[in-house]
Amino acid sequence: MIKATLTGQRLVALFVLGWVVVNYPVLSVFDTARAWFGIPSLYLYVFGVWAAVIALMAWIIER
């Protein structure tokens, strides 16, 4: 029971963290005209954060 509660708390914390890093103030930092390998930095940031949140969520659930 304690393990399920801890997992739920970690998932809620991950949700809040994910929400913060794709919200306006942080997202505006990567909204520049620069591109890496022809891909705009904003796209790389959004998809990188998205993949990291999914990977962390899977790690939390499987742990």
Image: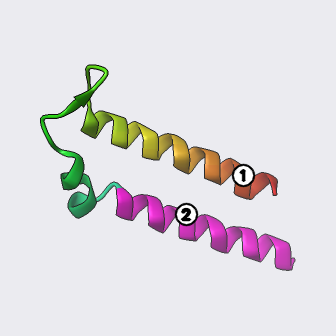
Spatial separation of the CA atoms under disc 1 and disc 2: 11 Å
* Magenta part, dominant SS: helix
Residue 9 is left or right of residue 63, and the answer is left
Along the line of sight, the residue nearer the viewer: 8 or 23: 23
Q: Residues within 10 Å of mark 1 (few under 14, many from 20)?
A: few
Q: Which residues are magenta?
A: 1-21
Quarter-of-image position of residue 63: bottom right
Q: Which residue is disc 1 drawn over?
A: 59
Find numbered disc 2 in the image and state the secondary structure of the residue it sits on: helix
The amino acid pointed to by label 2 is: Leu
Q: Which residue is disc 2 drawn over?
A: 14
Q: Residue at x 36, y 64 (%)?
A: 20
Position above or below: 24 against 12: above
Q: Quadrant of the N terminus?
A: bottom right
Residue 59: x %, y % from top left: 72, 52
Quarter-of-image position of residue 35: top left
Q: Residue at x 75, y 55 (%)?
A: 61
Q: Residue furthest top?
A: 38
Residue 60: x %, y % from top left: 72, 58
Magenta stretch contains residue 29: no
Residue 40: x %, y % from top left: 24, 30
Q: Residues within 10 Å of mark 2 (few under 14, many from 20)?
A: some
The amino acid pointed to by label 1 is: Trp
Residue 17 is left or right of residue 39, and the answer is right
